[in-house]
Image (spheres, rainbow, N blue to C red):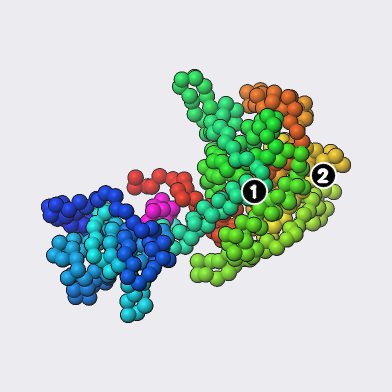
Amino acid sequence: MNDVNSLTAVRLEKRAALEAAGLRPYGGAFPVSGDVGDVRAAFAEGKAVSVAGRVTARRDMGKSHFLDVSDHSGRLQVYLQDKAIGEDGIALYDRLDIGDFIGVEGECFTTKTGEPSVKATRFVILSKSLHPLPEKWHGLQDIEARHRQRYLDLISNEHARDIFRKRFAIIREIRTFFEERGFLEVETPMMQAVAGGAAATPFETHHNALGLDLYLRIAPELYLKRLLVGGFTKVFELNRNFRNEGVSRRHNPEFTMLEAYWAYADFEMMAELVEDLVCRVAERVCGGLKIEHKDAEGNVTRVINLQRPWRRARYGDLVEGAEPGWFARDASARRTRALELGLDISHCVEDYEVTQHVFEKLVEEKTVDPCFVTHCPKELIPLAKTNPDDPNALDVFELIMNGQEIAPGYSELNDPVIQRARLTEQSGGEQHKIDEEFLQALEYGMPPAGGMGMGIDRLVMLLTGADSIREVILFPHLKPRADA
């Protein structure tokens, strides 16, 4: 820490020297020819350019100096010659540190070693960095520091930059996919009077002017269905949801979801839509349908095969295949067996929840390639239609791969009488937990429809090979630092 403090003190002295010389250590606008990568891509010998970025390397050779200037798009070498930049330029160069932002004007040329470079005729300092950057080759080694100080991680870690470039491209491709199919992108409230559309603990807030308790949304579903009632036939929303629950490798209290609703469709049509979507995104953003996951040393540990068609299997068949004779047992025997499997089953867990725990451990966690799990028990999803041939099952799918759920989809329940009964049962009879406005909208008539949701963070994890949700969220939620 003392070494860091002494280095910062030196940089502060250089900052003061700049000000004493009448130079601004934090400059203003500097028009550029493009991002660093754009300038490099359009490189032409003798071309006049202006470029700006962070100094990430410097090499001194007598009266000649070389700097690497970088931004998110790449790196470009800058050549400074004492004779060309003059005494003022030399004095400014002496006060530069790695990490400073500079602006450079000059001409493109290629060095004897074949390196595209800019020969500077003028340069200015745009921002003085007061702290040393992480080492170029090692970056931030502390994983929590990487997440807490994401800006430093992005400076020094090309892999992190690549993950987020892919994330942004994935979201852009999702939007294009739905727009090409006639879906409208909509926005629904993030503060809601009733936290509905999912079973989760919400964050609570209060609106002073209205004297109203509100909740940050746990899902947008009930508002999106109101739009089907209102006459829109295809809608989607890329939304932020909030759930006041645990933080883990796969959970963050604030996360991104895609939800889409399609009038006159059903769960099977939504499954086809999801399959089309994920395959298109994988091909256009990740370059193919085989996604490699690697360990820290770069060794391939898992390959996810997205080749079509994807497997479809009924929930009960998968459970029975993993644990033969499961449904022939009575509830007490199932609970005993679940405990033998090491599952944490409390005395108040319902029988269908015991089966769900077994499904998650023996089926979901072991499934690598995509599988649509269909006809789930009716107790699990109160907003989906019952299967006409099996009153104990629903017309739904849960897409699982890479050991986790990626996307659920339903034939949406549009019978207001049954929907009210389901929500009442789910709420335990507590009327204030029931969204009466949604039920009233449903009573005006909602067309039959298919709906789906998809966890964008989990999809990005899948397609980039990230092993933690914190690797794909720019600023994940963390506990306060112990020394804060």
Separation of marks 2 and 1 at Cα, in angstroms: 50 Å
Describe the element under mark 2 as helix, strand or loop.
Answer: loop
**Is 415 included in the stretch rendered in magenta?**
no
**Is 151 included in the stretch rendered in magenta?**
yes
Instruction: Look at the image and give the residue range highlighted in magenta.
Output: 144-153
Identify which residue is drawn at 64% across, 35% down.
Answer: 224
- Answer left or right for 329 relative to 442: right
Residue 370 at least partly seen: yes
Between 436 and 414, the one nearer to me in the picture? 414
Describe the element under mark 1 as helix, strand or loop.
Answer: helix
Between 62 and 121, the one nearer to me in the picture? 121
User: Residue 330 bears which disc, if any?
Assistant: 2
Q: Which residue is mark 1?
A: 180
- Return the x and y of residue 466 as percentages of the image width and height: 54, 59
Query: Residue type at mark 2?
Result: Asp
**Outermost residue toward the right?**
389
Between 389 and 362, the one nearer to me in the picture? 389
